[in-house]
Amino acid sequence: MTVLITGAAGFIGFHTSHALLDRGEEVIGVDNLNDYYDVSLKESRLATLTERKGFQFHRLDISDRDAVDDLIGRTANITGVINLAAQAGVRYSLVNPYAYTQANVEGHLVLLEACRKLDTLKHFVYASSSSVYGGNTKMPFSVSDPVDTPLSLYAATKRSMELMSHSYAHVYGMALTGLRFFTVYGPWGRPDMAAFIFIRKILAGEPIPVFNNGEMERDFTYIDDIVAGVLACLDHPPVAADGVLPYKIYNIGNNKSEKLMRFISILEDALGMKAEIDFQPMQTGDVPATYADITDTQKDLGFEPSTEIDQGLPRLVEWYRDYYKV
């Protein structure tokens, strides 16, 4: 199998690429290495991939039609696509909204249009987000819940990706699956995510910002569980039958909502330091709680998350200390 992975130098893309290489797949990695966060971290991830047999890398932006068409046009036997390239972050969408429409909407469309012409393609998997549930208050979030009230532009672009994919499944019969990721953490993670920010600030003796005065809950999902879900999904493309489109959406989460203050307490224990907490009000576009219903994911894909934050956060702290020599 030859798999095209966009966002290969990103957090999830990096780990997914390694997992595919571990099982003997050929991986074509794509990333534009933008500077939304520390580029050197992306380069370090990429360096571990480029050393491996079966991996090739192309630096390009997925919204660049000519570059994407050229790459896909001259690459034989692409059987799977995993689109993980995106402009991430809820709060940054208030600062640079056009980055979200370019990467998440235009970029996804460019890939769909290029990949629909591939005779060898068996499955196109892409990253959506739990943010699409917006202001929903029913817990846990189910893929059957309405998702027409996005609270951020980021969420709106992710929902747009789902709708575009539905149309391509209908018009072209492409097998397409969207994965609604819930808060992902772990080694090699993103510096703009809460776990990373908290570790850095606690070690530096700086106060950590805690929004909604600490009344926050998240379905924190360890990176190894996320990758297991992505691969299980890739291996189970939806099939058209009896008027049903080859189109699916799944939640990929830990199936548990953890209180943010407990999350911080575990980090404090792992670091051996107490956090100075700066309580702040809820941020625009944010939601107070997330919680994934993974019933369909378990039934269809055999997905069973196995890492609790009590195990995952110490692993993240250990990696952080090693990588940053703290």
Image (cartoon, rainbow, N blue to C red):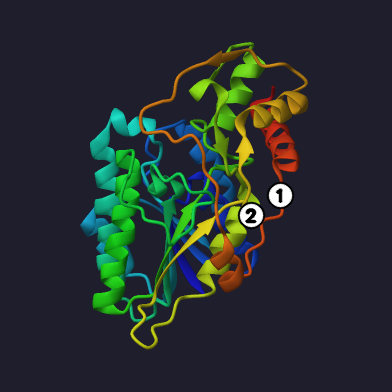
Instruction: Kindly identify the amino acid type of the residue bearing the numbered disc 1.
Output: Thr
Label 2: element kind: helix
Task: Work out which quarter of the rendered image holds the C terminus and state it.
Answer: top right
In this rendering, does residue 60 appear at all? no
Q: Residue at x 44, y 32 (%)?
A: 37
Residue 163, percent across and down?
A: 29, 61
The residue wearing badge 1 is 307
N-terminal of the pair, mark 1 or mark 2, is: 2
User: Which residue is nearer to you in this view: 91 or 24?
Assistant: 91
The residue wearing badge 2 is 225
Residue 209, percent across and down?
A: 52, 19
Residue 29, percent across and down?
A: 45, 56
**Furthest-bottom residue in this view:** 242
Is 126 situated left or right of 216 in this image?
A: left
Q: Quadrant of residue 244?
A: bottom left
C-alpha span from label 1 to label 2: 7 Å
Label 1: element kind: loop
Instruction: Kindly identify the amino acid type of the residue bearing the numbered disc 2.
Output: Asp
Where 151 falls versus 108 (above or below)? above
